[in-house]
Image: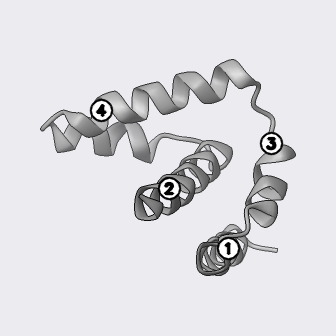
Amino acid sequence: MSDAIQQEQIDQGVMETLRERDHSALAQQVNHLGCDNNDIIELLAYYMALSEQENDELFDDWYDNLSKDQHTVLKVFEVYRGQYEHQN
């Protein structure tokens, strides 16, 4: 299966999960990744720090060089964050 098709399936799964507010499908996507907790914390910290800066080029360069697993973690993070922001 090509990366583009897999990415489209992940994106569709994320959107379905967002509509359903069910985290089980998202958990399945990240539970098998080759990242440990420290890797994920570091990724999210860097993501948040760069997101708050006004240097779009720096952020884009960083984001473009992430692995597929790191992109998946960030997508899942954004879905969770969006759900929690809209609950309040």
- Disc 1 is placed on an element classified as helix
Q: Residue furthest front?
A: 88
Residue 31 sits in which quadrant? top right
x then y, percent, for residue 88: 41, 58
61 up-or-down from 6: above or below: above
Residue 84 has which mark? 2
Q: Residue furthest top?
A: 38
Residue type at mark 4?
A: Leu
Decide: marks 3, 1 in contact (CB < 8 A)? no
35 up-or-down from 66: above or below: above
Horizontal side of 27 relative to 57 (left or right) equals right
| Sooner in the amino-acid sequence: mark 4 or mark 3 | 3
| Residue on which the image places disc 3 | 33
| Disc number lying in front (3 or 2) | 2
Residue 60 sits in which quadrant? top left
* Quadrant into which the N terminus falls: bottom right
| Disc number lying in front (1 or 4) | 1
Horizontal side of 55 relative to 18 (left or right) equals left
- Colour scheme shown: one colour
How many C-alpha atoms fall within 10 Å of the one at disc 2: few (<14), some, or many (≥20)? few
| Residue on which the image places disc 4 | 50
| Sooner in the amino-acid sequence: mark 2 or mark 4 | 4
| Residue on which the image places disc 1 | 17
| Disc number lying in front (3 or 1) | 1
* Mark 3 vs mark 2, CA separation in Å: 23 Å
x then y, percent, for residue 61: 33, 40
Residue type at mark 1?
A: Thr
| Sooner in the amino-acid sequence: mark 1 or mark 4 | 1
Residue type at mark 3?
A: Leu
| Sooner in the amino-acid sequence: mark 3 or mark 2 | 3
How many C-alpha atoms fall within 10 Å of the one at disc 3: few (<14), some, or many (≥20)? few
